[in-house]
Amino acid sequence: MSIVVQKYGGTSVADVVRIMNVARRIVATAEQGNQVCAVVSARGDTTDELLELAREISPNPPEREMDMLLSTGERISCALLAMAIDRLGGQAVSFTGSQAGIITDTVHTKARILDIRAFRVQEALDTGHIVLVAGFQGVSTDKAVTTLGRGGSDTTAVALAHALGAEVCEIYTDVDGVYTANPSVVARACKIDRISYDEMLEMAAAGAQVLALRSVEYARKYDIPIHVRSSFSDSEGTWVREDDETMELEQPIIRAVTYSTDDAKVTVRGVPDKPGVAAQVFSALADAHVNVDMIIQNVSEQGRSDISCVIAAEDGPAADRALRDIVAQLGASGYDADERVAKISVVGAGMRANPWVAAKMFSTLADLGINIDMISTSPIKISCVIEEARVEEAVRTLHTAFELDDQCVYAETPEGGAAAKPRAPAKKAAPAKKTGAAKKGAPAKSGSAAKKAAPAEKRSS
């Protein structure tokens, strides 16, 4: 009997009708002779509502208590789904993250999984139960409730798939796979049938929200195939797995164009140009658990220079506290944050052997009159920081410039529009859903890196 691990996002369990639909899908999977472990996210906008409620109480709530509060959303979903399965005649048992044996470090709101002790989950499966696990949460080594940060339910599902020895982890969401761009921005975006771990990692890091970055990291480390599917249809989705010869033969030069608008460009001005200064700046940010992307240090003038980096908008308050102290220690001129920026990226393993990709990307942006503030590269990704107001135009133009439009066959719909279908196998594309871009952050503030994180944080969608 095989073990199937499934994950259902917040939109999949947003109301009673959808909860019942998910329950039927899970029961049907079990009736096919599988042992089923399903990881569930908080319903719909539950997390946003809890965040708003917390900030009405306190503008800067303690992180430990935020974990206690936010972890309740997934528990509600699990209990309701267990009731739905029971109504359909199935046997289900729901577990919190701690009951499922998810052990994390002691960092609140961004905990990392250290170990999975899934003994209770396995015992319940062996006795014929369908097991429901609250995603996005665990218990720390000092026995406190912790949450895993954005996309935490994806990470929970992949980690459990590894611990239970499942052959695949199915991620059910409101879209039917991974697309070459955000379909709500690019009308001719096309669903990708298969993609490598490396490409998916770069896409997740560059703003694609279909899968959380850490879940893909975990899947690549333990070679766990991920199948991204729609919870509203039975169609084949996108397979994320290790490269094979077939994938290499079909590999386009550029696989996708992604973007993110919930980042901020932070600049520390007038730092002394001497060894060890950069280490002090980024050590302070690391101690505050602020992830840093894209770093630039300008040419020194009169023994001083500026250091710029990109951080997530939600990390603004933590960065503000860290930089306020380090600026004083270094005797720097000050620091500021600009949220009116966006990060746009082209991703594809095929660019390893094609040196013209960077030139084409930069010339395309130049033809649009778009200035580039920062650039970072990897063997399969090029990212640029540009002004936020131009990002959607840039995405559409780059999608066409790199011939991603041509990967789909278009047919006229009865309503007169264009419907995209993959060339092989031919399948109807999903309706325009927001899958390729991060959500917009809070308005920019000048003179400080302090920014209120956007309340709309669908971490596990």
Image (spheres, helix red, strand yellow):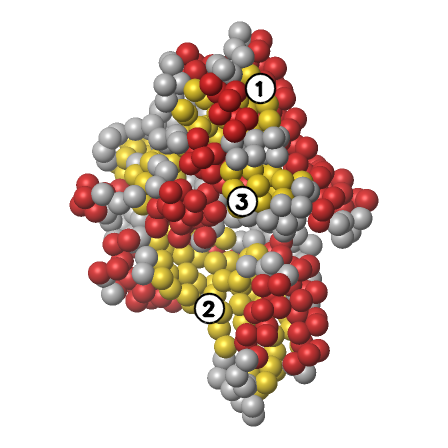
Q: Earlier in the sequence, mark 3 or mark 1?
A: 1
Residue situated in front as seen by the camera: 340 or 247: 247
Marks 2 and 1, how far apart at CA: 50 Å
Marks 2 and 3, how far apart at CA: 32 Å
Question: Which residue is painted at 63% across and 44% down in the image?
Answer: 140
Report the residue marked by disc 1.
93
Report the residue marked by disc 3.
113
Report the residue marked by disc 2.
374
Task: Say if residue 351 shows up in the picture.
Answer: yes
Callout count: 3
Within 10 Å of disc 1 (Cα), the crowding (few <14, some 14-19, many 20+) is many
Badge 2 vs badge 1, beta-carbon distance below 8 Å: no
Residue situated in front as seen by the camera: 350 or 70: 70
Q: Earlier in the sequence, mark 2 or mark 1?
A: 1
Question: Which residue is painted at 30% across and 33% down in the image?
Answer: 421
Amino acid beneath label 2: Met
Image location (x, y in percent) of residue 351: 27, 58
Secondary element at tag 2: strand
Within 10 Å of disc 3 (Cα), the crowding (few <14, some 14-19, many 20+) is many
